[in-house]
Amino acid sequence: MTNQLIETYLKKLKTSGIERHIPNISVENAEFIKGIIRDKNPKRMLEIGTANGYSGIHFSSILSEWSILTTIEYAWNAHIEAVEHFKECKIKNIISIWGDAKMVIPTLSDNYFDVVYIDAMKREYLDYLLLSLPKMTKDAIIIIDDVIKFRDKMTNLYEFLDRNGIEYNICSTDPDDGIMIINFSDIWKTQFLQDR
C-alpha cells in the first residue's frame, strides 16, 4: 500500500476509533514518535498495547523494510481487529501477539529491542518497564504514553524512577497529554541495574 493510501486508511481508522471510544494514540503523539523512530532507525521495536492497530500502522510505516515491530494486545477482539487492519494495509513487518504482556514479555528474546513503546494498562506501566529491561539493547529508547493525564494511575512508575535517580523527559506533544522518553543507558548506569 502506498504512503498516501496508508494515510487515508489511518484517518478512517482514527475516526472509527473515536466513534467507538478506542483509546488510540493522538495524531500529534504518533507523528512525534515517528520522528524518534526515523532518527533511531531501529531494527526491532516492541509495542505494549496494540488496541485496533492504529499506532502499529503508524510505526510500521516509518520502519525500514528489514525492521520488525512486535506488538502485544490483551483483548482478543482488539487483537483480531488489529490483525485485519494490518492485512488490509499489506503490512508484513509486524508480529502481532495476543496475550497478557506480563506473561508474553518474559518469553521474548533478551537484548533484542531498540525501541519499546508502552501504551496499555496504566497501573501496570512499571511492570511492563521492568519486564522489558532485559529485552532491550544497550542503547534502546523507551517511550511511555499518557504520562500526564493518567499520572495518578502510575504513581509507582514515577516513584521507581525518582527513587533510583533515573532521568526521563516528558514531552507535551499534544493538547491532551504527553509522552515520557527514557534512555536505557540512563537506567543501566543506576545502582538499580548494577545490583541485579
Image (tube, helix red, strand yellow):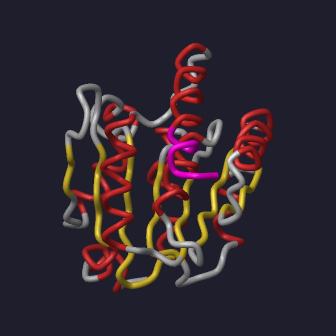
Give residue 95's quadrant in the image.
bottom right
Residue 89 pos. (x, y %): 68, 48
Residue 129 pos. (x, y %): 46, 60
Q: Nearer the viewer, residue 116 or 91?
A: 91
Q: Nearer the viewer, residue 19 or 187?
A: 19
Type of secondary structure dominating the magenta stretch: helix
Give residue 162's quadrant in the image.
bottom left
Magenta segment: does it hold 116?
A: no
Q: Which residues are magenta?
A: 1-7
Count of numbered marks: 0
Quadrant of the frame with the C terminus:
bottom left
Side of 163 relative to 102 (left or right): left
> At 49% from the left edge and 44% from the top edge, which residue is drawn?
119
> At 65% from the left edge and 66% from the top edge, which residue is drawn?
93
Q: Nearer the viewer, residue 116 or 87?
A: 87
- Against 65, is 176 above or below? above
> At 56% from the left edge and 74% from the top edge, which residue is drawn?
67
Give residue 39's quadrant in the image.
bottom left
- Against 175, is 79 above or below? below
Side of 64 relative to 79 (left or right): left
> At 33% from the left edge and 31% from the top edge, which residue is drawn?
152
Residue 9 pos. (x, y %): 59, 36
Residue 125 pos. (x, y %): 46, 49
Magenta segment: does it hold 6?
A: yes
- Against 52, is 191 above or below? below
